[in-house]
Amino acid sequence: MPITIGIPFYNAEAYLANAIRSVFAQSYQKWELILVDDGSADHSLDIARSVKDPRVRVISDGQNKRLPYRLNQIAGEAKFDFIGRMDADDLISPNRFGKQLEILQRHPEIDLVTTGVCSITTDNRPIGVRGGNPEDVISGRTLLLGQSAIVHAAILSRRAWSLRNPYDESINRTEDYELWLRAFSRSDFRIYVMSDQFYYYREEENVTPKRQLTAYASQRDLYQRYGYLGLGSHELPLIIAKSYLKSAVVYAFSVAGRMDLLLKRRNKAITDKAKLDNFTREIKQILETRVPGLD
């Protein structure tokens, strides 16, 4: 059963090649890879076009239309019934798509499957983990409060689901969050949360004051739009006030030059040596994977 893998990218020349290596390193090799440029001004497009493999397609229109538009574009361009994605600056476990596909084939009632995360540094060192498990109960409330352990870039979905649930292209930074809430409100959010950390998320450069503050502002809008899914009318003002407090904390950490503290709060330390060794081994395997045209 072939799958479509999409990587949208924008000025990602520092990491795109290794994201592509992650796909070529997959134990499951029945895939097509769609590389979608969002108007990059660096050498990202040259890197994408250098790959020589008939399973790889590069799409570029020279415009910067932002991530939600490109994710919808990937769903429309996909040839196959299952769509996986990843961000252009991340890595994925060689076992990711094979394991996710097994779950979707075993559970026809499920439309999406996500995995846990291993947070990595800019030089590919594992520094923390987070995620959920299949027994987690995902309610409107857990979605609203960001307590669902859903990792958006680690999703493998049925294409039919993605086509009937497109991203809202007007949303900035919280497009996945809005999509989950909208699908849940329509009783169309059947997801399986894997406990395995199959996604290597490069967070050091992503936890920036601007991104965090934009996300919190958008989140407050979504509280008001979808609060009926799990918040009492008396709770909504309090939740919004807490969001403003989080924004104030981000601002304070930014002024103090300690944004790293926010990153540490997101993840659990990796205390299991066997797990750490496995992460290190997988990352090494990915980085050493040869890709025709890149090597």
Image (cartoon, rainbow, N blue to C red):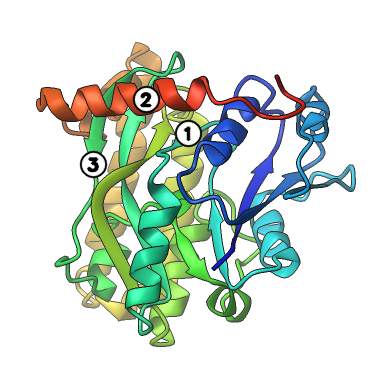
Between discs 2 and 3, the one toward the N terminus: 2
- Across and down, in percent, residue 13 comes to 69, 23
259 lies left or right of 11:
left
User: Residue tagged by mark 3?
Assistant: 130
Question: Residue 213: horizontal and vertical position, in percent?
Answer: 46, 39
Whether 287 is drawn above or below 242: the answer is above
Residue at (33, 52) in percent of width and height: 115
Q: Which tag is nearer the camera, tag 1 or tag 3?
A: 1
Q: Residues under labels 2 and 3: Cα distance?
A: 12 Å
Disc 2: which residue: 120
The answer to whether mark 1 and mark 2 are in CB contact below 8 A is yes
Q: Residues within 10 Å of mark 3 (few under 14, many from 20)?
A: some
| In the depicted structure, whether residue 51 falls above or below residue 271 | below
Q: Nearer the viewer, residue 210 or 4?
A: 4
Vertical placement of residue 129 versus 27, above or below? above
Instruction: Decide: is 107 above or below 76.
Output: below
- Residue at 21% over, 32% down: 265
What amino acid type should be assigned to the residue bearing mark 2?
Answer: Ile
Q: Which of the labelled discs sits on residue 91, or is there none?
A: 1
